[in-house]
Image (cartoon, rainbow, N blue to C red):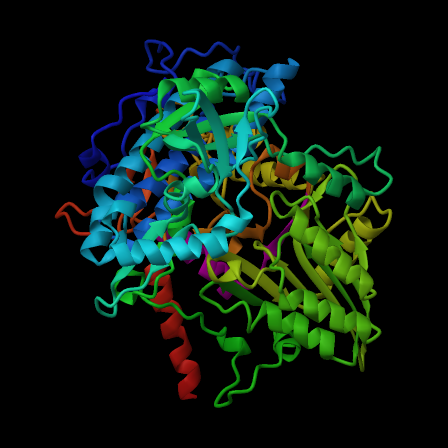
Amino acid sequence: MTTSPRSLPDIVESSSVVPLPTIRAQRPRAANGRFISAASPGSAAGDGDDELLPGDRFLDREVSWLQFNERVLQLAADPDVPLLERARFLAIFASNLDEFFMVRVAGLKRRIATGIATRSASGLEPREVLDEISRGAHELMERHAGLYREVIAPALERERITLVRWDELTGKEQKSLGEMFRSTVYPVLTPLAVDPAHPFPYISGLSLNLAVILINPQTGAEHFARVKVPPLLPRFIELPSDDGLYATRYVLLEELIGNHLQYLFPGMEVHETYTFRVTRNEDLEVEEDDAENLLTALEKELTRRRFGPPVRLEVESEMDDHVLDLLTRELRVQPSEVYRLPSPLDLTALNTVADLDRTELSYPPFVPTTHPTLAPVESAAPGNILRAMRSGDILLHHPYDSFSTSVQAFIEQAANDPQVLAIKQTLYRTSGDSPIIDALIDAAEDGKQVLAVVEIKARFDEENNISWARKLEHAGVHVVYGMVGLKTHAKLCLVVREEEGGLRRYCHVGTGNYNPKTARLYEDFGLLTCEDTIGEDLTRLFNQLSGMAPKSKFKRLLVAPRSVRSGLIELIDAEAAKGADGMIRFKVNSIVDEAVIDALYRASMAGASVDVWVRGICAIRPGVPDLSETVRVRSVLGRFLEHSRIFAFGRGKSATVYIGSADMMHRNLDRRVEALVSITDPQQLKTLSTLLDRAFSDEISSWHLQPGGQWHRHHLSAEGTPLVDIQSELIDSYRARRRPGRRR
């Protein structure tokens, strides 16, 4: 059952976040305003030491994620965002929600079905969480569809970017498309009928399908058939246009197929046609201990992925009830899992529109700059990365600092350097045509010792990772798949070079993947260094990953699952001991871990200042009297995906600051190999501190989390003018930073 969509002006015109009362549990409150939780105080924290903390102190993880995706939807609704970027945010919203259902909702349903689901830290029973997700997702998806149909699509039409219906085409255009259908589309279609001889077909996850009702003219009997829209063909078919340079017209692939069904069912009458889409459980379960070969086991599991049980059924709003009854019965979905939406379904295809070359409708062009330390003065030749590293640590900030002229160049130059003896690298996600992979292959073929710690279980990149893992193996690279039971998520590279004084180790420790494509879109930090202590730490860690070294100790690294949580809590407690002089600042993608949050609560209760900059999921309640009065939580979304992690403790020159790969999630702290590295250079500490200061300034556009779990958007001044976009400000500041170097 769906809820009524909220009026569009609430989304489009509101200067604050659209509230989501339907996805906040309506639990009673005590006299002090706090929720009365069903969980006993301290039962959810995990360590049993926090019985004096209120039981309702954690926000719900799944609800928080839906609210994050709502913030994405708000960017799509913001008239100050360029039009094509608004279309892209619509596509991002749809893609995010797909993954949420495939993993989070599917996992929750699986745990409920097996009887192992427990009450969440927020105090909600598993079925309550599922119910809240359903209500919130229904409302958000309806807003999403309405925003496209009523706001974005008309705005695109005004810019002569049009999605044309079949009956709006000229006879000549229909004829041309008909020829294209017969030559290109028809041969790859497989119509599947349902009758006693043909059982209901398997519907693959995320595939777009046509439900076709046919009538036999001789008998009058009604039949059902399914036609899958081919995923490898362009969804948006561009029409030739002679109406000026910027006119772009599309017709949907499913519209083309739906108007040529007579070729698929000759002799039958096409009575009704509707689109639908199924989302399935696509999380992986691989028993590593029982698998003789993890790679083979994963390949087998990937073939099973598309056969997971359905968790969501999206149908065209005009679909007839008897057709919907057939689908729900055959697919075994519950009424709450059915989402009636106006066509077109699957707005991830809007990326095609967002990619149009219309600069006036997009963000201003952005070209990363080379870090000044790595940029040769008055020369077009690439800088010598290893020589620059010998002069001191280099802190990189992507995408403002070019990835290709820093990290990529570092690995490529190491691969081609005859004095380099070995390269060791972790790889979690990278592109299929990655120059990083090519560089490692070149190094191996040149006789260098090359180790690649490949995480083939990187979610939804498994097939790509298997492919290039085999490519590396064939080239002579030593490929290992990390440690049993743990994903290797750390971002590390170690280069060993023979020099006059002996061996020197060159290191990179980062917060983002070694992926040149996403490095242009993701905000991340990385440290290039040849400092001996870090070199020793990385050597120990790589030995642990490739061999047997479980007792390794580190000096400048915190490494999960052994020391990240405990190390951070120790640093938090040290700031708490300072009282009002204590300062703790985090920048993370998500923060859920109860032990870390409770430590932050204790620090706040002691008077310390606690600032959390989070992109997505947040389970901490800020500003609650006698619990988190000194806690502030901010969220920033924009043209770049905020991906870096910073952990800062203390003030001024005495501050302790770490950057690294770990979020404050159970999976990161308990089930992954993560690495944080301490920053010691005074100028770099100042850079990170200034960034954190700026993010929490009232001049910066951001979302503010309220004690009750609501997010309020803070993007307009008291005069109604837009506040500063921190990413745009950073683009300008990094561009200006290059000018002094050029004048020397």
Q: How many marks?
A: 0
Where 470 falls versus 405 (above or below)?
A: above
* Residue beneath the point at 80% across and 82% down: 500
The extreme left residue here reads 719
Report whether 725 appears left or right of 102.
left
User: Nearest the camera: 227 or 197?
Assistant: 197
- Residue, far front: 218
Q: Is residue 668 visible?
A: yes
Residue, x 49% and y 55% (percent of image)? 184
Q: Position of residue 22 (x, y in %)?
A: 33, 21
Q: Report whether residue 477 is seen.
A: no
Give the x, y percent position of residue 253.
41, 48
In the image, residue 735 above or below residue 131:
below
Task: Kindly report the secondary structure that dominates the magenta region of the rendered protein.
Answer: helix
Which image quarter: residue 16? top left
The foreground one among 7 and 216 is 216
Asked whether residue 228 is drawn in magenta, I would say no
Picture quadrant where residue 295 is located? top right
**Quarter of the picture holding the N terminus:** top left
Q: In the rendered view, would you say 65 is above or below 221? A: below
Is residue 686 covered in magenta?
A: yes
Seen in the picture, residue 527 relative to 713 is either above or below; the reply is below
Residue at (43%, 50%) from the top-left corner?
235
Q: Can you give x and y, in whole percent of width and height, for residue 104 in the image?
A: 54, 30
Looking at the picture, how far across and down is residue 443, in whole percent?
Answer: 77, 72
Query: What span is colored magenta in the figure?
Result: 673-695
Quadrant of the snapshot with the C terminus: bottom left
Q: Observer-nearest residue: 205 or 203?
A: 203
Residue sitting nearer the eye, 644 or 454: 454
